[in-house]
Image (cartoon, rainbow, N blue to C red):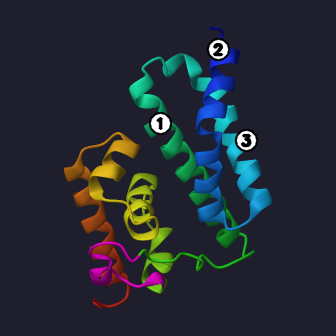
Amino acid sequence: MTDRERAAELYRQYGPAVYRRCLRLLKDREAARDATQEVFVKLVRDIARLDDPGIVLPWIYRVATNHCLNQLRNKVRRGEEALDGFEVSSSDGASSFPDRHLASTVLSRFDERTQAVAVGVLVDGMAHEEVADALGVSRKTVERRLTKFLEGARKLLGGAS
């Protein structure tokens, strides 16, 4: 199978999931379509590095999340909109997490991996194990990054819990 055929197959397989992910983060259908295309453009450029089928999905998920977060951060920097559209999931333990305002205020102050963890757990309601699998990191890394995010958020807002 050529790289082009493989990229087309990956698009058929993962394109809808990437679009849903981008739509959830960007809340705009056109922007989500554009972001999905950008993710797969990056995939085509890096397809030679994605020989192991076990790393493809985590790679795609990470690139989609980072691309969308960068788009949102750039809009905030340009003053086009506030980063306030996130909803905190109501899954297990979500009631102990900061509310939507805390997450949206603090999110842009962290590195991309910490942002991806925070969005995966707080926005998407994913379990720590799911986020770890999607990002290709350990569950412990997810816990550490989420703790870092939550502690930073509390400091930023003057110790609010």
Q: Residue 47: say if magenta.
A: no
Q: What residue is rendered at 66% in x and 9% in y?
A: 2
Q: CA distance from mark 3 to mark 1?
A: 16 Å
Circle 2 residue: 3
Quadrant of image for the C terminus? bottom left
Left or right: 5 with respect to 120? right
Residue 73 - label: none
Q: Which residues are magenta?
A: 90-100
Circle 3 residue: 37
Tag nearer the camera, 3 or 1: 1
Q: Determine whether the residue tagged by mark 2 lies in a helix, strand or loop.
A: helix
**What's the amino acid at mark 2?**
Asp
Q: What residue is rendered at 42% in x and 29% in y?
A: 55
Residue 149 coordinates in the image, percent (x, y): 33, 68
Left or right: 66 with respect to 9? left
Q: CA distance from mark 2 to mark 3?
A: 17 Å
Residue 3 coordinates in the image, percent (x, y): 64, 14
Circle 1 residue: 57
Q: What residue is rendered at 60% in x and 28% in y?
A: 10
Tell which circle, 1 or 2, labels the residue nearer the N-terminal end.
2
